[in-house]
Amino acid sequence: MIRRTASAVATLALASLLAAAAPSAPRASAPPFLTIVSSLPRTGSANSQTTSIVNGIKMAIEERGGKIGDFEIRYEDLDDASPQKGNWDQNIEAANANKAAKDPTCVGYIGTYNSGAAKIAMPILNKAGLVMVSPGNTYPGLTKPGAGEANEPRIYRPSGTISYFRVVPTDDIQGAVACEFCAKDLGSKKAFILHDRELYGKGIADVFKKSAPGMGIEVMGFEGIDPKASNYRSLVTKIRATGADVVFYGGTTQTNAAQILKDLRSGGCKVPFVTPDGTFENAYIEAAGKDAMSPESGPVYITFGGLPSEQLTGRGAEFVERYKKKHGEVPEAYAVYGYEACKVLLDAIDRAGKKDRATVLAAVAATKDFEGALGTWSFDENGDTTNRLMSVNTVKDGKFAFVKAAGGGAGQAK
Amino acid sequence: MILRAAAAAEQLAILALARADSVPSFAADGVLSPPEVFSQQLVTGLSNGMIIALIAIGYTMVYGIVELINFAHGDLCMLGAFFALTAVGAFALDGASGAGGVVGLVALLVATAAFCGALNWSINRLAYRPLRSASKLSLLVAAIGASFILVNLGLFWGGLPMEVFAGGTSAAAPKAFPALVEPKPAFTVGDVIVSRPDVLVLAVTVPLMAALTWLVRFTKLGKAMRAVAQNPVAAALMGIDVERVIGATFFIGGALGGFATVVYSIYNQTVGFQMGYRMGMDAFIAAVLGGIGNLPGAVLGGLVIGVVRAMSDGYVEARWTNAIVFGILILILVFRPSGLLGAKLREKV
């Protein structure tokens, strides 16, 4: 019996390899299927965010009735985090990528959430010719020549073709958007820029610094801080001494953004404090506490490389409505990006019309004027979205509150 | 789309209006003159230094009496901060004001000190005392083990479903500690701000240091402690209950850490399970700098570390601060191996 099952499995595998050519295989009644895999950190602190991404992916598949043409679409939700780390793990990410690469029915890989994990998966999938669409990576070096290390993004493309795409705008745009907001909306003239000396934080701070002179902002200081220090009082004195009228911190909640804010406020410095989306999470508000986040203490702004769910319009708003109806809660910010990533992939599979990785890859790359939930956008020659829509947020009554959309680009969905 | 554009324009106009009001208030903070900057850095440095000093005393006392670098000391303080935060939440201390607030604060200080003292005493009783006759290395490893246990207890504690821990949704995230003493200026000299927490630091640390000096110099227990530090065997022969004295030392050292951690939490308004590492490291450097085992040395070391950190952040660059602090430590250890105030130690046999 076991032998029979084994041989059946083998036949099935063979059959799926030759799916188109072998309609008279033993299990001819079973419909041909394609697999889409996602690899996201499902264990640990990112879980609530990734759960809503997975929900978004599932909704995109359901909208198509679970099939495209004659193909049934199967979806596999892989976890790239380990409980020991509580975060993405490079061994697991590599295993996920290899698994997808070896699965002949797999035609698309949605992921990763973390840019670091993408660095592991990208070359593996690129060699296998499997298209990868990320709903969450924002590190510019993954796609843009000259934006990261000297050998980036070449090292991620061993086959020479571009097989990695993303539906979120990158960090470098975020730094520029933050700078523009400070200059135009806050009327800042003198900025003090801090960063946490990490890839993400310093990257954004660098762009802010580069954009500042063009926006009429004088850079009063540019400093890497010690993200483990118990307080930053002396730094605050230094900032006060320069007469800076805005403080930008390229960093995250984990690298002590809340502590800097608290020390600014207790040090008597009420200038606006602007941070990137590494602080766009409730933990930032909780760590800073009521007093530091109250409007009397001074304004706080957080940029985010997209729009919060409540601010989506048109098809985006429809998605949020459907999501709320189905899951009974407002989706987290990245849910719509998961939905969009899956939608654009399904659209490409539809256009490709056959089970062939190269054809699907070419179809994704050719995506142009895609009418998605995030607006009408295309993939550019690097695999980045042309959508540059971002938002500036503040904190009101202990919750994030939308201030304005920024960045422009493809425009809001109608 | 046009409608959206109009709405956006309107929002911009609102923002612009808000800006007209708010810009002057940003500028009104006043730009500090160079002497004011120096004085402000000094205030910051001394406040941080006093807190470090109070923790360093706990290190140095324990070393003085059992020659153990108690690596769990910083994490003990961390756990004390969690205890304090829990107490603040349970008794709604952040809502109290006036006389009630002062009583609440004093009660919090004493309770946390008692908690930390008792915990330190227990760690000594359970982990260190059985190893008294073992090699010093075993004791050190036990201290590192105790440190790990405390850190993980802190991680667990932070995940408890309490309001002060933001419902315990993220155990590892830093928690906001309510500003029991509001970070408002107590008084200003020009534009130099001496804040209420700065005053609190002084009001708590100085009397404690004075009390400790009195205890060590003029009480029977203090005499016994000095005797045990000098020679435990001889002290035992004189009829001193050595283990009891050691236990008392751990209790007092821990209690001072408890006082320090409450002040630290109010001053920084943040509590996190990893904060013990930095607290312990700074205090350890301070103790070594001042001459480990020497009480006034620990205080001096703490103040030096605090001021050097502030000046380095202010006049050099924040990223060099750790390098500068450790550089000074190395220099002192090269030219004065026993620390600033440390007496030349004879090698104990």
Image (spheres, rainbow, N blue to C red):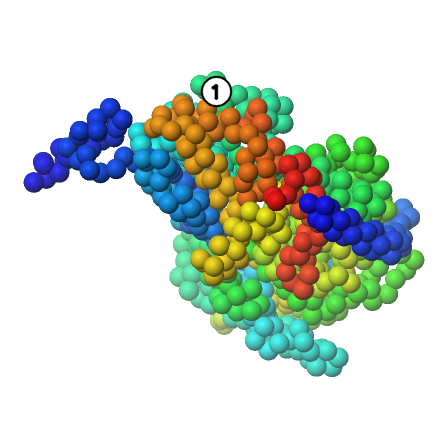
Residue A389 shows in the view: yes
Q: Tell me which corner region of the image, top left, top right, bottom left or bottom right, holds residue A300.
A: bottom right
The answer to whether residue B45 is left or right of residue A253 is right
Q: Quadrant of the C terminus of chain A?
A: top right
Q: What residue appears at the point 66 percent right and 73 percent down from the top-left corner?
A: B94
Check the image and report above or below for A329 versus A319: below
| Residue toward you, A229 or A254 | A254
Task: Measuring from the top left, give residue B201's x and y in whole percent.
Answer: 73, 64
Instruction: Pick out the residue farthest to the left.
Output: A1
Q: Which residue is found at the position 32% from the left and 36% from the top?
A: A71
- Name the residue carrying label 1: A161
In percent of width and height, residue B327 lies at: 68, 39
Whether B83 is drawn above or below B91: the answer is: above
Mark 1 residue element: loop
Assess disc 1: are there few (<14), some (14-19) or many (≥20) residues with their C-alpha within 10 Å of its C-alpha: some
Q: Nearer the viewer, residue A53 or B130?
A: A53
The reply to whether residue A121 is visible in this rendering is: no
Query: Residue B183 in the image: x percent, y percent?
Result: 76, 64
Place of residue B257 in the rendered image (x, y in percent of width and height, measured from the top left): 60, 64
Q: Chain of mark 1?
A: A
User: Quick check: B193 above or below A158?
Assistant: below
Q: Residue furthest bottom?
A: B99
With A402 as the anchor, is A351 left or right in this view? left
Quadrant for the N terminus of chain A in the image: top left
Question: Looking at numbered disc 1 in the image, what kind of residue is underneath it?
Answer: Thr
Q: Look at 46% across and 67% down and name the residue there.
A: B122
**Nearer-the-camera pick, B107 or B172:** B172
Number of residue marks: 1
Extreme residue in the top direction:
A160
